[in-house]
Image (cartoon, grey):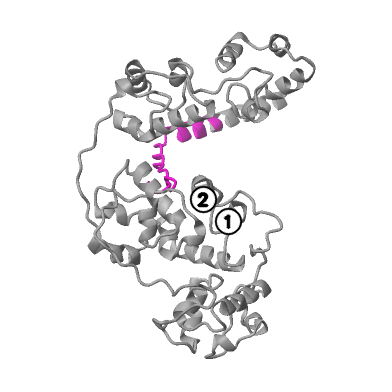
Amino acid sequence: MRKSYYQKLAFMVTLLTVLLVYQKYTSREKEPFPEVTFIKDASIPVNLSDFDPNTLDNEQWQKLGFSEKQTATILKYKDIVGGKFTSKEQLKKCYAISEEKFSELASFILLPEIAEKGDSKRFTTYGKKGIMISGKFNPDQFSANDWLKMGFSERQSEAIIKYRNYLGGSFISKEKFKECFIISPENYHKLEPYLLLPSKTPENFRNPNKNNFIKPRIQYHAFDPNQLDLEGWKALGFSEKQAAAIINYRDRNLRGSFKSLDDLQKCFVISAEKFQEMKPYIKLQEKQQEQTDFSKTDLNTITFKQLIEFGLDERSAGSMIGFRKKLGGFMNKQQILSTYNIDQNLVQKLISIAPLNISNVPRYSLLEAPEEWLKNHPYFKYSADKIIFYRISNPDDKKIWKLLKLKPEYEERMRLYVK
């Protein structure tokens, strides 16, 4: 009896203690929850257009959104791989370029996805990370072994010697030495104080491996950058790829024209030095742009620029043009409304005004359709392998349709592109 009494007493005391602790915990003031802030990811530069990474200098890499340290690393990496990037795959390996940043830039990079095999002109071997200079020297007297000792790779050393021979056996000047594509800007700045060469190239210097004299300085004349075509930009000293990038930037990013000098200066292909050279001769002329008559503009030929003019944003216009390209052309206006990422209201208004001409849209029978077309067409690619297999032993479109056993809605849209 007494034992049972003490057990009940202990239980009551424990229960009372738990209740008091709970009451104290629940009655305390609640601490405010800290505010949460989100860091926005860096976005791709709005003025980005197609570019060759081998032509970019320090400033141009920074215009693409890289820091000074990242830019220095990229240029050093270019030097390590032989002074020239040979593919997107190779550029992606540079640790200064994050996967996210590379994915943003990939579609604009003017390089093959993978380096061509067996191309002896491409330098893919890795050299030493730094160069060592013992004192002033004349690079005309250096052998390949001397360049190796300085820190260049075997292939880089051979390339430097080949370049010197190309100039006639002498680098002539610091200017010509700097033009050797194996010598990165970073390494040139290290070497320049020690070079026993004249600073400037003699005006009468003639390259024995060319039939003419070195090109003189560009003679600028007044020009309107909105009127220049590819040849016009090349005449100003830009390479063909650089000229194409400038035109692409003007037409795609600026909707057809430079509005101010600032617009031109922001183009990453144009260095600050080059812009200052051209600036006195740039004459921007205002001109009235003809308005598009959308009631006479075919939806299968309407341009990105015209869609922007109608009022679509770049995302909507790009999606519509991209989907049309994949299809080979729209067969009915309802397809346009099914495009992803478009402004439905504006596009509905557009297709109610503009005509659709389907006479030039490619159409094939299932037997005649090219394999590549079947595998790339949005409506056929998921059935492409079956079609290719079935038509080997069933040379009849009707039989192939039966064997495919497609959902009615899938078959209906595929038949739009079948003869």
Magenta segment, prevailing SS (helix, strand or loop): loop
Choose top left, top right, bottom left or bottom right for residue 352.
top left
Labels 1 and 2 touching (C-beta < 8 A): yes
Residue depicted at x 20% and y 39%: 288
Q: Horizontally, is 146 left or right of 236 in the view?
A: right
Residue depicted at x 46% and y 54%: 241
**Residue 240 seen in this snapshot:** yes
Question: Secondary structure under badge 1?
Answer: helix
Q: Position of residue 106 (x, y in %)?
A: 53, 47
Label at residue 109: 2
- The kind of residue tagged 1 is Leu
| Mark 2 crowd level (few <14, some 14–19, many ≥20, 10 Å Cα) | some
Residue depicted at x 66% and y 80%: 148
Residue extent of the magenta highlight: 18-46
360 relative to 35, above or below: above
Task: Compare marks 1 and 2 and give the one earlier in the sequence.
Answer: 1
198 relative to 318, above or below: below
Quadrant in which the N terminus is drawn = top right
Say whether residue 33 is magenta. yes
Q: Position of residue 405 (x, y in %)?
A: 70, 11
**Residue 270 seen in this snapshot:** no
